[in-house]
Image (tube, rainbow, N blue to C red):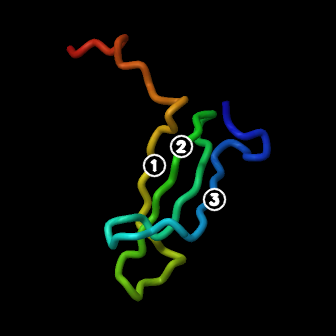
């Protein structure tokens, strides 16, 4: 169930205080899209890149992972 404070089709990211490697995201956060909650990871496009234009990745939160047992490969 999405956070009650977060509206559908909105999200937010913050600086990643746990970043220890260059491969870790520069920013992390959450978003709700179509009623499904996602984790958001974001990276600056270059080390001195504009933080207002990051590259984004959306991942299902653990509790919202899709059930692939019903998927039928045709």
Determine contact: label 3, label 2, CB under 8 Å. no
Q: Which mark is residue 34?
A: none
Q: How many other residues sit within 10 Å of disc 3, few (<14), some (14-19) or many (≥20)?
A: few
Residue 22's image quarter? Answer: bottom left
Determine contact: label 3, label 1, CB under 8 Å. no
**x, y percent for residue 43:** 42, 69
- Distance Cα–Cα, label 2 vs label 1: 6 Å
**x, y percent for residue 58:** 45, 49
Pick out the residue farthest to the left. Answer: 74
Q: In this view, does 46 lie to the left or right of 50?
A: left
**x, y percent for residue 44:** 42, 75
Q: In this view, does 20 lie to the left or right of 35?
A: left
Quadrant into which the C terminus falls: top left
Q: Residue 12 carries which label?
A: 3
**What residue is at 59 percent from the left and 39 percent from the top?**
37
**What residue is at 53 percent from the left and 43 percent from the top?**
38
**What residue is at 36 percent from the left and 19 percent from the top?**
68
Q: Mark 1 points at which residue?
A: 58
Of the pair 21 and 40, the residue shown nearer to us: 21
- Distance Cα–Cα, label 3 vs label 1: 12 Å
Determine contact: label 2, label 1, CB under 8 Å. yes
> Which of pointers 3 and 1 lies earlier in the amino acid sequence?
3
Q: Name the residue under label 2.
A: 38
Q: Is mark 2 on a helix, strand or loop?
A: strand
- Distance Cα–Cα, label 3 vs label 2: 11 Å
> Which of pointers 2 and 1 lies earlier in the amino acid sequence?
2
> Which of pointers 3 and 2 lies earlier in the amino acid sequence?
3
Q: Is mark 1 on a helix, strand or loop?
A: strand
Q: Is residue 19 left or right of residue 23?
A: right
Pick out the residue farthest to the right. Answer: 5
């Amino acid at each position: 169930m999405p956070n009650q404070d977060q509206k559908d089709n909105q999200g937010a990211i913050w600086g990643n205080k746990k970043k220890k490697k260059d491969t870790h995201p520069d920013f992390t956060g959450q978003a709700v899209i179509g009623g499904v909650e996602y984790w958001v990871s974001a990276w600056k496009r270059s080390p001195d890149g504009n933080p207002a234009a990051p590259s984004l990745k959306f991942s299902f939160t653990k509790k919202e992972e899709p059930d692939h047992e019903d998927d039928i490969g045709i």
